[in-house]
Image (tube, grey):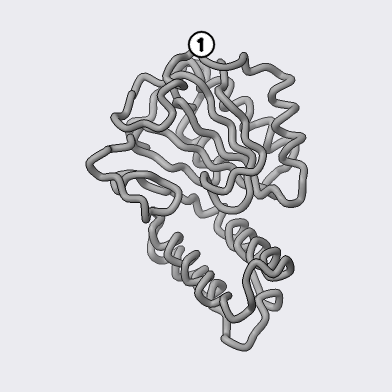
Amino acid sequence: MNYAIIKNNDIADGLGVRVALFVSGCSIHCEGCHNKEAWDYNYGKPFTKETVDEILTMCEKDSISGLSILGGEPLAIDNIEEVCNLIVSFRKKFHFTKTIWLYTGFRFEDLPIKAGVQNFVDFLCTWVDVIVDGPFIQEKKNVSLNYRGSSNQNIRVFSHTLPKLLHQIVYSINERLESKQFTESEVPSRLEFMIQVFKDTTWDEETFNEYEQFLVVPKQEKLINIHLPN
């Protein structure tokens, strides 16, 4: 597998500040794709053990919320094995203290099967926190959407990751309060934005209702005092 670029302070491809790996190779070829050069499987640099070590080192910083894997197409047959190995290496090092977001142009129900990767979909649902799936469709482009480019694409959040995402929201907003990027009076509107992000995601209503209460901040209460589930 080759990769196009690694970004170490990405804020566009998942919640928080992230390390983002853009792999090379894609056969979907969406019209309007912003990363056409990465369609070529030979584009960029070889993905090696040293590359994995570099990514894991970048993710060590407290300010990094996790890893985002994009493309190209991470789940192209030629890329799946290396991507799965990276996910395993990430979990061995960080366990579930940081999140993994994975972007794919395949629909979730049409994910390819790779010989040697057993129970592939179960693997993703267990070890990946968020999957953004579906091809980019130019006619459905919507710049107001969060973390995706067109309205047909889905953000799929798996239940095991909800407490982590909520902690990351609070950490992110606390950081901005401390650095005076915005004031306490702005916190309710910021949380309202995050709640909208969650409502855009694909999960069952009962699970969302269970956690939505932790996103509500009384007007006079400081964010740092919010109680979150472990």
Residue 218 position in % (x across, y down): 57, 85
| Residue at the bottom extreme of this rendering | 220
Question: Looking at the image, which residue is at 45% across and 63% down?
Answer: 207
Q: In this rendering, is residue 57 above or below 191?
A: above
Is residue 120 or residue 150 the one in the foreground? 150
Disc 1 marks which residue?
42
Q: In this rendering, is residue 9 above or below 225?
A: above
Residue 114 position in % (x across, y down): 45, 19
Q: Does the image show residue 230?
A: no
Instruction: Give the quadrant of the C terminus.
Output: bottom right
In which quarter of the view is residue 177 placed? bottom right
Question: Looking at the image, which residue is at 68% across and 35% down?
Answer: 90
Residue 124 position in % (x across, y down): 51, 36
Instruction: Give the quadrant of the N terminus.
Output: top right
Q: In this rendering, is residue 201 above or below 54?
A: below
| Residue at the left extreme of this rendering | 139
Question: Looking at the image, which residue is at 74% across and 28% down?
Answer: 54
| Residue at the front extreme of this rendering | 181
In the rendered structure, which amino acid carries the disc numbered 1? Asn
In this rendering, position of residue 218 left or right of residue 91: left
